[in-house]
């Protein structure tokens, strides 16, 4: 019976007639009162797994979230769908807090979003006692990896959530996160005191994301190339320092691309204003440190650029995963150099965080960046998934944008030999000059034009050779020295390859394939499928209607409808309210409130 009620609620409120993997099992655990841990990638539909059961089970569902902006977005979306939802956090005024407390006592809410500080900080016991008197049906802990010291975003206040068991002894607890290794999942269950929890772990692969990696060359040109592929689309550019964020945002704006910076060095009001400008689609590009992203619910981010490598694959997966939350295609581009990893080591060492574990995480990130092979396979297998697909159709390697070297072992040994011949005292640019046979002033001053490796690779460009060197660094055949003027040096593994050409079976090197000027832009499988049958002009007109409705209501456009719903409208072109209700993402409340505005445009366009 509960299953039928869930299906009815989901179709009526959210307009969904089918569920994503593991959603049903997760909802049934919540409805059945069994503790659970759910790990689904960003965009996998975690929120629905506690929102829908809240409308099936009697009582008040409490959602713990550390993300104030996300709370507001989700409450706006829920109330827009006709669901009685509220929030309680530090952003409220005294009068607003009193109104929420009154609403709780009167039983007006089905869902209440609260910050962990509200539950464990000053006055927390009183608030928990209030909740205990309100008939709480279950507690959902979002971003649950924050409770684990083994997670990548540990927050001490989350540790104290175990007191929920004391104040709400008969209430089931449910942990939700997008990123959690087996060790983190065990820690979550222990710290929350979960009782024989059901553990559900979804596939980490996001087939709608197109992964690309580029060695850093002319960074600004590389970023402009991405923006040219995504005109009038939303994107995030991540940098590793505040200074880089400010400079890049200012430069983009000077190039006629409105962009705002976001980092911890801005005032609270500045950060809030820039974030709101992005969410409300007054701007489409934000340049940020990793301080930006958690709690950003804009679903139609079509590209994420890392203008420098992050410190771990876990961080990359979470940050890149902010693209394509609506399930439609999105591009994730990593632009990196070996200097990124040197910088991270210095930063971690100066902060006392450089450990064997953090070194390993950096090495794994470098291996991904320098790798030659299917990016989807690499990421899926890193997180412990089996990847059965042959050719993902959604990464630079599988789209044929990388050209494997014909004789990679010979090429690697030539580069390693050159590094050795110049005394392991120079960087990539100098080594590339020697290999190309370019008698620069520095090359001649050191007499390196007389080395046997001078001119070994005369047809290779500097960018191509730097790319090969980055790959050899990632493969552990070369390393950067730790002195003030870091230079390329051979590792024991690299020395072994110089002596024995058979010591690295399966070695692969590749360069970026130069696109033909008349060649069409590479399109992933997900992009081709998502646009199949869609009237693009109608889609753009529907976006304009959505923006107008959002401005009128004072909410972000994606709270009205996601892009995926607008594309479906532009595909099936409904002209009646009944037909509109068949479109995924259109529930009864939105059809009643908004339907005629969108139907009018569709009718006009199709006649």
Image (cartoon, grey):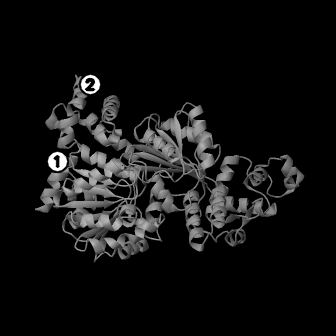
> Relative to residue 165, is residue 480 drawn left or right?
right
Kindly state the secondary structure of the residue where label 2 is placed. helix
Q: Is residue 67 visible?
A: yes
**Residue 269, which numbered label?**
none
| Residue 142 percent location from the top left of the image | 35, 61
Kindly state the secondary structure of the residue where label 1 is placed. helix
> Relative to residue 416, is residue 169 drawn left or right?
left
| Residue 279 percent location from the top left of the image | 41, 42
Determine the residue positioned at 34% across, 30% down.
Answer: 544
Residue placed under numbered mark 2 in the picture: 605
Assign the C terminus to one quadrant of the image: top left
Quadrant position of residue 469: bottom right
**Circle nearer the N terminus (1, 2):** 1
Determine the residue positioned at 50% across, 59% down.
Answer: 315
> Relative to residue 212, is residue 121 drawn left or right?
left
| Residue 43 percent location from the top left of the image | 36, 53
Assign the N terminus to one quadrant of the image: bottom left
> Relative to residue 214, is residue 431 drawn left or right?
right
Between the residue at mark 1 and the residue at mark 2, the CA separation in whole angstroms equals 28 Å
Quadrant position of residue 118: bottom left
- The residue carrying pointer 2 sits among few (fewer than 14), some (14 to 19) or many (20 or more) residues within 10 Å by Cα, namely some
Residue placed under numbered mark 1 in the picture: 12
In the rendered image, the vertical position of residue 284 relative to residue 510, given as above or below: above
In the rendered image, the vertical position of residue 212 relative to residue 553, given as above or below: below
In the rendered image, the vertical position of residue 148 relative to residue 5, given as above or below: below
- The residue carrying pointer 1 sits among few (fewer than 14), some (14 to 19) or many (20 or more) residues within 10 Å by Cα, namely some
Determine the residue positioned at 46% across, 44% down.
Answer: 272
Which mark's residue is nearer the viewer, 1 or 2? Answer: 1
């Amino acid at each position: 019976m509960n299953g039928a009620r869930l299906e009815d609620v989901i179709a009526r409120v959210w307009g969904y007639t089918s569920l994503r993997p593991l959603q049903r099992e997760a909802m049934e655990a919540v409805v059945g009162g069994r503790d659970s841990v759910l790990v689904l990638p960003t965009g996998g539909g975690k929120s629905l797994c506690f929102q829908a059961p809240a409308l099936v089970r009697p009582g008040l569902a409490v959602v713990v979230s550390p993300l104030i902006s996300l709370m507001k977005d989700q409450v706006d979306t829920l109330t827009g769908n006709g669901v009685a939802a509220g929030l309680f956090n530090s952003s409220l005024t005294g009068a607003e807090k009193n109104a929420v407390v009154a609403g709780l006592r009167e039983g007006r809410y089905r869902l209440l979003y609260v910050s962990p500080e509200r539950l464990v900080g000053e006055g927390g016991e009183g608030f928990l006692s209030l909740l205990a008197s309100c008939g709480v049906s279950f507690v959902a802990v979002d971003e649950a990896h924050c409770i684990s010291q083994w997670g990548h975003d540990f927050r001490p206040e989350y540790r104290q959530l175990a007191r929920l068991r004391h104040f709400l002894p008969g209430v089931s607890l449910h942990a939700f996160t997008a990123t959690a290794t087996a060790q983190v999942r065990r820690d979550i269950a222990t710290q929350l005191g979960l009782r024989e929890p059901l553990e559900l772990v979804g596939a980490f692969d996001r087939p709608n994301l197109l992964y690309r990696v580029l060695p850093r060359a002319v960074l600004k040109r590389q970023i402009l190339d991405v923006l040219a592929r995504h005109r009038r689309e939303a994107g995030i550019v991540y940098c590793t320092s505040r200074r880089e964020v400010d400079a890049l945002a200012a430069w983009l704006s000077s190039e006629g691309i409105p962009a705002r910076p976001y980092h911890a060095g801005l005032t609270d009001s500045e950060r809030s204003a820039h974030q709101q400008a992005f969410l409300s689609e007054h701007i489409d590009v934000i340049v940020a440190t990793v301080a930006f992203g958690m709690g950003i619910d804009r679903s139609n981010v079509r590209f994420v650029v890392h203008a420098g490598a992050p410190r771990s694959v876990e961080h990359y997966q979470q940050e890149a995963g902010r693209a394509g939350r609506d399930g439609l295609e999105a591009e994730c581009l990593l632009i990196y150099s070996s200097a990124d990893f040197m910088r991270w080591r210095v930063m971690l060492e100066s902060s006392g965080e450089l450990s064997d574990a953090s070194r390993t995480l950096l090495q794994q990130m470098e291996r991904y960046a320098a790798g030659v092979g299917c990016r989807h396979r690499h990421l899926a297998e890193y997180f412990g998934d089996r990847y059965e697909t042959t050719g993902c159709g959604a990464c630079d390697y599988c789209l044929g944008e990388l050209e494997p070297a014909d004789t990679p072992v010979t090429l690697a040994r030539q580069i390693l030999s050159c590094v050795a011949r110049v005394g392991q005292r120079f960087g990539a640019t100098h080594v590339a000059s020697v290999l190309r046979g370019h008698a620069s002033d520095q090359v001649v001053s050191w007499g390196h034009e007389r080395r046997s490796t001078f001119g070994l690779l005369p047809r290779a460009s500097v960018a191509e050779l730097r790319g090969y060197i980055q790959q050899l660094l990632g493969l552990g055949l070369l390393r950067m020295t730790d002195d003030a003027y870091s230079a390329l040096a051979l590792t024991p593994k690299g020395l072994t390859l110089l002596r024995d050409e058979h010591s690295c079976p399966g070695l692969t090197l590749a360069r970026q394939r130069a696109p033909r000027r008349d060649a069409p832009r590479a399109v992933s499988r997900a992009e081709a499928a998502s646009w199949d049958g869609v009237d693009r002009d109608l889609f753009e007109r529907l976006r304009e209607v959505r923006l107008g409705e959002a401005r009128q209501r004072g909410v972000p456009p994606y709270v009205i409808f996601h892009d995926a719903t607008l594309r479906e409208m532009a595909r099936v072109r409904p002209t009646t309210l009944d037909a509109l209700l068949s479109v995924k993402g259109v529930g009864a409340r939105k059809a009643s409130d908004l339907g005629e505005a969108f139907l009018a445009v569709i009718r006009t366009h199709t006649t």
